[in-house]
Amino acid sequence: GIQVEQSPPDLILQEGANSTLRCNFSDSVNNLQWFHQNPWGQLINLFYIPSGTKQNGRLSATTVATERYSLLYISSSQTTDSGVYFCAVEQAAGNKLTFGGGTRVLVKP
Amino acid sequence: GAVVSQHPSWVICKSGTSVKIECRSLDFQATTMFWYRQFPKQSLMLMATSNEGSKATYEQGVEKDKFLINHASLTLSTLTVTSAHPEDSSFYICSAFPTRSYEQYFGPGTRLTVT
């Protein structure tokens, strides 16, 4: 099956810093989503981004499907950005998502 | 829109008993829902795909007789953990996607502890 790798596994940031999270996948995909899992376990949808670039406030994401990677940018980080960020890919429409291992982010005040 | 709920949020049960977890799509219909399991500090692992009106499809290594899935309506899927053991203790999360949407939306999860 498809392999999804995220880097770095852990990230410690000072409040206000910028960061880039990476997601590599081993095969072509129909769908790619980024999620933030908050401390209570809820997955929050950040981006649906099978290709191209999107921005939402301080977050933005870029997927280069031909090179099989996606990047999530966090700018001016805040303590509320702490948590685990997952990318997940879908290989066929309506099919299951395969998750990467996640990046655990801690933003210190 | 696209809200998924789960009930209960957490449950503690004794070894050997069964526990039912509900997953509901509150503002959309879902012919397909998914059940995941997450162990502490690990990623989500898909357990099964729940299809309305038909049998669930289980991932390799998941015991279908232990994790019973019923998708009785377009807004409700249930996961029953039968004869639970301490190793079944985990965080169980469901997801669904609305018709004509390519995004999956996740429930808040159910934390199961088996004593």
Image (cartoon, rainbow, N blue to C red):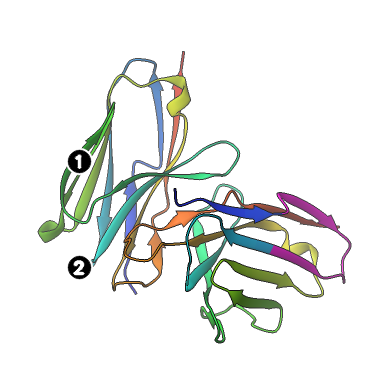
Residue furthest left in the image: A66
Q: Which chain carries label 1?
A: A
Residue closest to the eye, B67 or B22: B22
Q: In this view, does A69 lie above or below B67?
A: above
| Residue at position x 20%, y 40% in the image | A54
The answer to which of marks 2 and 1 sits earlier in the sequence is 2
Are the numbered discs 2 and 1 placed on the same chain, yes or no?
yes
- Viewed as shown, does residue B108 lie left or right of A61? right
Q: In which quarter of the image is the N terminus of chain A?
A: bottom left
Alpha-carbon distance for marks 2 and 1? 20 Å
Disc 2 marks a residue whose amino acid type is Ser
Q: In this view, does A50 lie above or below A13?
A: below
Residue under numbered circle 1: A54
Q: Which chain carries label 2?
A: A
Magenta region, residue range: B8-21
Residue B34 magenta-highlighted? no
Residue closest to the eye, B13 or A3: B13
- Viewed as shown, does residue B106 lie left or right of A55? right
Residue B19 magenta-highlighted? yes
Residue under numbered circle 2: A28
Element carrying mark 1: strand
Residue closest to the eye, B28 or A52: B28
**Residue density around tag 1, few if under 14, some if 14–19, many if 20 or more, within 10 Å:** some
Q: Where is residue B38 in the image (x, y as percent from the top left)?
A: 58, 56
Q: Where is residue B95 in the image (x, y as percent from the top left)?
A: 50, 60
